[in-house]
Image (cartoon, helix red, strand yellow):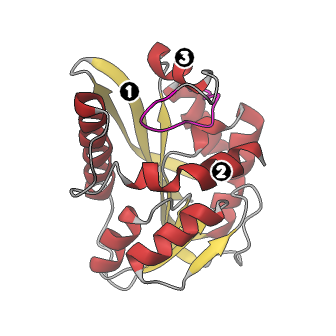
Amino acid sequence: MVKKALFDAEAEAWESLYRDSSEARWGVFQSYARKRTRARMELCLSLLPPLAGKEVIELGCGPGYYGMRLIAGGARWTGLDISDGMLAVCRNNTRSERLVRANVLHLPFRHGCCDILLCIGVVSYFKKSAAASLFSEASKILRTGGIFLTQTVRFDPLTWIRCRLPHRVPRPLRIPGPFYPRNPNTITRLLKDNGLSPQRIVPYRKFLIYPAGTIYVAEKE
């Protein structure tokens, strides 16, 4: 519930990482964070199969910028988030009523209901056992041959510190850590254990050379 409350309070700050018109109150730091956030979104979207007519569910839909792009691509998109604040911003951006407030560890969808499932910026908040539960839930709602795209962070000392700063310390946005960085071998094993066959594993970087995270594209067996 602490993370939910923090996401509620930080919804507009997270949205500012996607909006061209948002004021960069933190100068180069916020501008660079915005650039990295958008680059990650473009990379994730480029790894998806054609969207037209597909049932797509996004876990942790946040402010809805992935959703807008998925809808524009012809997907029948549904967004899920635990934060009322995020869902309010998402509803305003996507103009969609296909929004669900729920915990990603207990998905309120029938089995085999979607073709593509996205889970960006979520898995690294969970310990290994919870991540395994999330992948199990994901596998249940995907159709056979469906695509699961997810992402995890690598160890980053700057983010590790930021997650643990007192709330009163000012910063562009607060991250409701701690994060749990995962080795790609661990995530690959968890995916396979839950009937999700990895098809592509794509690392991405920050500060030009520093590994920031990994994107996984897996197929439901």
> Which mark is first along the chain, 3 or 1?
3
Residue stretch in magenta: 170-182
> Which residue in the structure is indicated by mark 2?
135
- Residue 179: say if magenta: yes
Please state if 10 lies on the left or on the right of 108 as rendered: left
> Cα distance, mark 2 to mark 1?
21 Å
Q: Is residue 100 above or below residue 121?
A: below
The image position of residue 155, as x and y in percent, is: 49, 19
Q: Nearer the viewer, residue 204 or 88?
A: 88
Amino acid tagged 1? Ala
Magenta: main secondary structure: loop
Asked if 1 appears above or below 78 in the picture, the reply is: above
109 part of magenta stretch: no
The quadrant of the image that shows the C terminus is: bottom right
Q: Secondary structure at mark 2?
A: helix
How many angstroms separate mark 3 from mark 2 (CA)?
Answer: 28 Å
Please tell me the numbered disc located at residue 161.
3
